[in-house]
Image (cartoon, rainbow, N blue to C red):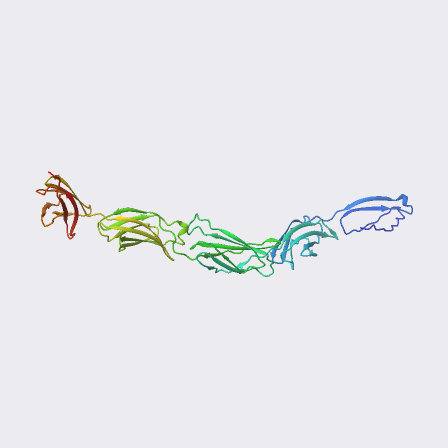
């Protein structure tokens, strides 16, 4: 500031000199008084205080090209009449005034998105200004707006959307998170993609799990930083048929005509969706299917009925979801004989035949038929007088050193029919 000079006349009564200097800027001032003799000049300094500064100054973006500045007025106001806001950024310097000492905010508009702005605010009163208080803010892109219906396949989700006009975009980040409450809570399948682009309209996320729900968001960015996160959208990938087989099968019980089995779950990442049920099949050797069952996914145990006694089956279990049936786990299962027969030589001319009837059956009587295996016409006979309580019988007067074929037939109670069991035995040599 250049020195200023004024001529002052003395008071003829008091011989005192009085003069008031008016200044418009706070600061330190030095006054020098001199008469016509410069060597007698006198100087004095004083500080002119400005008004107190506003406090709690913040600057927040509230649109692609606008910033709202807020502050707390000084207390006491001390005659403050308004505020001056200066801001730099976007290639220029600008200033605006706001009237009213109690004013607490002002919105700057017409700014440039993608630029950083430094904002300075001072309080004003009687032409004097306070010390400035600054805040800095960058104009980041607005939150992208996503369409609510993404396109899905078994392993991809395609989202579409846009960034509101006025936003400058240099890139964006797509993030997704799998809903662990549906299937496979321990499977980690979250991720993100960072893309360098001047716009956002469409993006496909790949490598996802079939039959899973994902929550997806997008964040746009520019030279000033990252903008707010978009409103999330959800998408459910299509299910695929299970690619994994159920866990090992365990035989629980087996009877003459049924088998009960249980099995483990399909490994979680191989379910490809929600398992709805399991199909259980019993197949004879040679490929003839003889029994099937279907049970809910939570059961994992089934009984297959209608089987044939003394038959070897392959029991298979496969998981089913809305997209199809997966591979099977198998277990060989053999139904028992209803009547188990054995025979041992008691002497060179006699055999003791023993049998066991399956617990679920009850006999009224037994018949034993036997014959020479080498010459059935030569020697064969039967015994039909064996009571239901019997479990063994001795055959006498047989030929020594001869093999016999022996069949025990149980006549069952009610309309149960008959049950047979066979064996062979060779007599001892005398």
Judge by depth and name the residue closer to the eye, 353 or 116: 353
Residue 73, visible in the rendered structure = no
How many numbered badges does the structure rendering display? 0
Q: Residue placed at 67% from the left, 52% from the top?
A: 118
Q: In which quarter of the image is the C terminus?
A: top left
Q: In this view, does 50 lie to the left or right of 426?
A: right
Give percent across and percent down for residue 203: 52, 58
* Vertical relation: 320 (above or below) 390: below
Give percent across and percent down for residue 162: 55, 60
Residue 30, visible in the rendered structure = yes
Q: Is residue 300 left or right of residue 184?
A: left
* Vertical relation: 325 (above or below) 351: below
Of all residues shown, which one is farthest toward the right?
Answer: 37
Q: Residue placed at 40% from the left, 51% from the top?
A: 270
Give percent across and percent down for residue 143: 56, 57
Give percent across and percent down for residue 282: 28, 53
Judge by depth and name the residue closer to the eye, 91 or 101: 91
The quadrant in which residue 85 appears is bottom right
Judge by depth and name the residue closer to the eye, 374 or 49: 374
């Amino acid at each position: 500031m250049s020195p200023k000079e004024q001529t002052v006349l003395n008071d003829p009564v008091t011989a005192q000199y009085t003069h008031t200097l008016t200044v418009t800027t706070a600061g330190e001032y030095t006054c020098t008084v001199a008469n016509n003799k410069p060597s007698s000049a006198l100087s004095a300094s004083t500080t002119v205080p400005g008004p107190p500064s506003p406090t709690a100054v913040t600057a927040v973006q509230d649109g692609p090209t606008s910033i709202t500045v807020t502050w707390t007025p000084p207390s006491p106001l001390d005659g403050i009449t308004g505020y001056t806001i200066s801001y730099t950024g976007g290639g220029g310097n600008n200033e605006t005034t706001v009237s009213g000492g109690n004013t607490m905010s002002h919105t700057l508009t017409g700014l440039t998105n993608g630029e950083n702005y430094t904002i300075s605010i001072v309080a004003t009163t009687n032409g004097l200004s306070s010390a400035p208080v600054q805040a800095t803010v960058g104009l980041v892109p607005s939150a992208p707006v996503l369409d609510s219906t993404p396109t899905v396949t078994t392993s991809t989700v395609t989202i579409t959307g846009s960034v509101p006009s006025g936003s400058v975009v240099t890139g964006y980040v797509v993030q997704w998170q799998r809903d662990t409450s549906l299937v496979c809570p321990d499977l980690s399948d979250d991720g993100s993609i960072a893309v360098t682009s001047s716009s956002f309209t469409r993006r496909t996320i790949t490598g996802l799990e079939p039959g899973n729900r994902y929550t997806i968001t997008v964040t746009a960015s520019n030279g000033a930083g990252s903008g707010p996160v978009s409103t999330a959208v959800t998408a459910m990938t299509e299910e695929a048929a299970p690619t994994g087989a159920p866990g090992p099968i365990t035989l629980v019980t087996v009877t003459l005509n049924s088998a009960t089995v249980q099995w483990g779950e399909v490994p979680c990442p191989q379910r490809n969706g929600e398992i709805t049920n399991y199909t259980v099949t019993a197949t004879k050797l040679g490929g003839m299917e003889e029994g099937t069952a279907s049970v809910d996914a939570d059961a994992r145990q089934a009984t297959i009925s209608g089987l044939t006694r003394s038959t070897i089956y392959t029991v298979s279990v496969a998981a089913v979801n809305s997209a199809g049936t997966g591979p099977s786990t198998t277990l060989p299962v053999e139904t028992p004989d209803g009547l188990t027969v054995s025979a041992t030589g008691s002497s060179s001319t006699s055999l003791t035949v023993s049998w066991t009837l399956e617990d679920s059956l009850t006999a009224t009587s037994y018949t034993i038929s036997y014959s020479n295996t080498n010459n059935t016409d030569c020697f064969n006979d039967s015994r039909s007088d064996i009571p239901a309580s019997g479990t063994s019988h001795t055959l006498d007067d047989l030929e020594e050193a001869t093999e016999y074929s022996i069949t025990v037939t149980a006549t069952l109670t009610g309309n149960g029919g008959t049950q047979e069991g066979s064996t062979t035995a060779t007599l001892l040599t005398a």
